[in-house]
């Protein structure tokens, strides 16, 4: 149904952007929706049973093969269709791998009773996620419609690298944590899981975001050349937005694990209403103002997501701020250290390498000196993993 709607609306969307060429591109790209629906239950099965190795192989295989295909088509002069082919082939390979590796397979059966039970909980989450998706695309839509395509490109490119880090770390941790939260026996256990997730994700992501703010100039110029220099300011601003995501995600997962999908929907409606008002105010001031509104909105959303968990599991704003403060403090100090290196005259490649190395060393050193809990937790996990590997090798030799 959604595909049919997009197919029909494609000419009107193209007219909105004054670009006739996207009609066919949109109609072909939208086929992803149909394909993706096939693997939805397999993804849920993998997440519930925590067999994430299957996720890894499906994602890795699809990414590598589709990436090679996209590059080859781009060099062959396929233009935008190289991106379309890469996008769709990634989805198709993901589906094929999951159908082969996951023991559950769909059957041509339907139960209205089961559908009702799922819908009572699920429809609220669907609408909450839909609101979130529409809002996330709204800024790009406004920039693309009200300003130049170049402004949109700079904005999206500045957003791309921090978004990639968040997607690969925060989403991965959240996917693993949610099934564990759902099985928590009581509120205290759920709070402990939430605290561990909060501390770990903030410990890993805060230094990455602050580091990206500091090294954004040499990073973008070296990776994308000087013609993308205008995207530096957007990366720096939007890193502040993405810093709030670990806190937002953990609180969202807690509410969802308790079964309060109604509360998830209410929170999204409140947050996105505020966000839309901020976007429309900012659009009159320019593209940079829109980026700043996104960063400010991230902090507002963070506190809105935190508020219910004081009542639900006694995890207050004060408690959460205390949990993330050690990682935030260490990350800021690390940022100041690597920022000072930029005043030394040296080739840009060497500058970036030194900043990254010094940043990693200084962050680990502060973690050790101040005995940051997440640092010791990660070390213990790595040590346990090492012992398991050594034990497995020893058993194989026997």
Image (cartoon, grey):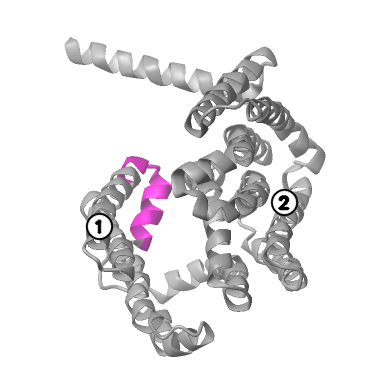
Outermost residue on the right side: it is 318
Residue at numbered disc 2: 302
Q: Quick check: 170 above or below 227?
A: above
Q: Quick check: 272 above or below 7?
A: above
Q: Quick check: 180 above or below 156?
A: above
Of the pair 361 and 73, the residue shown nearer to us? 73
Measuring from the top left, give residue 394's x and y in whole percent: 25, 11
Q: Is residue 343 left or right of residue 377?
A: right
Q: Is residue 195 left or right of residue 74?
A: right
Q: Tell me which corner region of the image, top left, top right, bottom left or bottom right, holds residue 230.
A: bottom right
Residue at numbered disc 1: 93
Q: Tell me which corner region of the image, top left, top right, bottom left or bottom right, holds residue 374.
A: top right
Q: Earlier in the sequence, mark 1 or mark 2?
A: 1
Q: Which residues are magenta?
A: 40-54
Measuring from the top left, give residue 276's x and y in whole percent: 71, 71
How far apart in space, not on screen, are marks 1 and 2 (Cα)? 36 Å
Q: Is-magenta flag for residue 22?
A: no
Measuring from the top left, give residue 9's x and y in whole percent: 45, 88
Q: Is residue 284 left or right of residue 338?
A: right
Residue pictured at 27% horizontal, 48% vertical = 64
Tag 2's secondary structure?
helix
Quadrant for the C terminus in the image: top left
Q: Quick check: 29 above or below 258?
A: below
Instruction: Report crowding for label 1: few under 14, some 14 to 19, many 20 or more residues within 10 A (C-alpha).
Output: some
Give the dominant element type of the magenta stretch: helix, strand or loop: helix
Residue pictured at 33% horizontal, 64% vertical = 83
Of the pair 235 and 55, the residue shown nearer to us? 235
Q: Tell me which corner region of the image, top left, top right, bottom left or bottom right, holds residue 188.
A: top right
């Amino acid at each position: 149904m959604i595909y049919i709607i997009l197919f029909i609306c494609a000419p009107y969307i193209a007219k909105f952007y004054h670009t006739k060429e996207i009609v066919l591109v949109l109609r072909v790209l939208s086929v992803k929706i149909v394909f993706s629906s096939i693997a939805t239950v397999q993804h849920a099965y993998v997440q519930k049973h925590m067999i994430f190795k299957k996720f890894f192989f499906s994602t890795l295989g699809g990414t590598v093969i589709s990436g090679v295909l996209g590059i080859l088509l781009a060099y062959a002069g396929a233009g935008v269709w190289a991106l379309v082919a890469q996008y769709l082939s990634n989805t198709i390979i993901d589906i094929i791998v999951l159908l082969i590796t996951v023991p559950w397979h769909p059957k041509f059966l339907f139960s209205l009773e089961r559908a009702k039970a799922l819908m009572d909980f699920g429809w609220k989450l669907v609408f909450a996620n839909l609101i979130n998706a529409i809002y996330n695309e709204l800024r790009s839509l406004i920039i693309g419609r009200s300003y130049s395509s170049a402004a949109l490109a700079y904005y999206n490119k500045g957003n791309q690298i921090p978004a990639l880090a968040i997607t690969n770390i925060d989403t991965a941790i959240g996917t693993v944590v949610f099934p564990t939260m759902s099985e928590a026996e009581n509120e205290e256990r759920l709070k402990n899981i939430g605290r561990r997730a909060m501390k770990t994700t903030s410990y890993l992501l805060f230094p990455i975001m602050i580091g990206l703010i500091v090294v954004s100039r040499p990073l973008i110029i070296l990776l994308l050349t000087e013609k993308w220099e205008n995207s530096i300011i957007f990366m720096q601003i939007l890193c502040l937005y993405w810093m709030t995501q670990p806190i937002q995600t953990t609180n969202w997962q807690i509410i969802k694990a308790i079964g309060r999908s109604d509360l998830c929907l209410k929170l999204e409606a409140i947050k996105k209403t505020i966000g839309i008002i901020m976007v429309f105010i900012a659009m009159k001031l320019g593209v940079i103002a829109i980026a700043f509104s996104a960063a400010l909105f991230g902090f507002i959303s963070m506190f809105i997501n935190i508020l219910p968990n004081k009542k639900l599991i006694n995890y207050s704003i004060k408690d959460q701020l205390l949990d993330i403060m050690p990682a935030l403090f260490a990350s800021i100090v690390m940022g100041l250290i690597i920022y000072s290196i930029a005043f030394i005259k040296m080739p840009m490649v060497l500058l970036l390498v030194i900043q990254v190395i010094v940043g990693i060393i200084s962050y680990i050193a502060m973690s050790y000196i101040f005995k940051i809990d997440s640092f010791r937790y990660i070390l213990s996990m790595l040590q346990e993993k090492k012992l398991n590997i050594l034990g497995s090798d020893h058993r194989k030799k026997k």
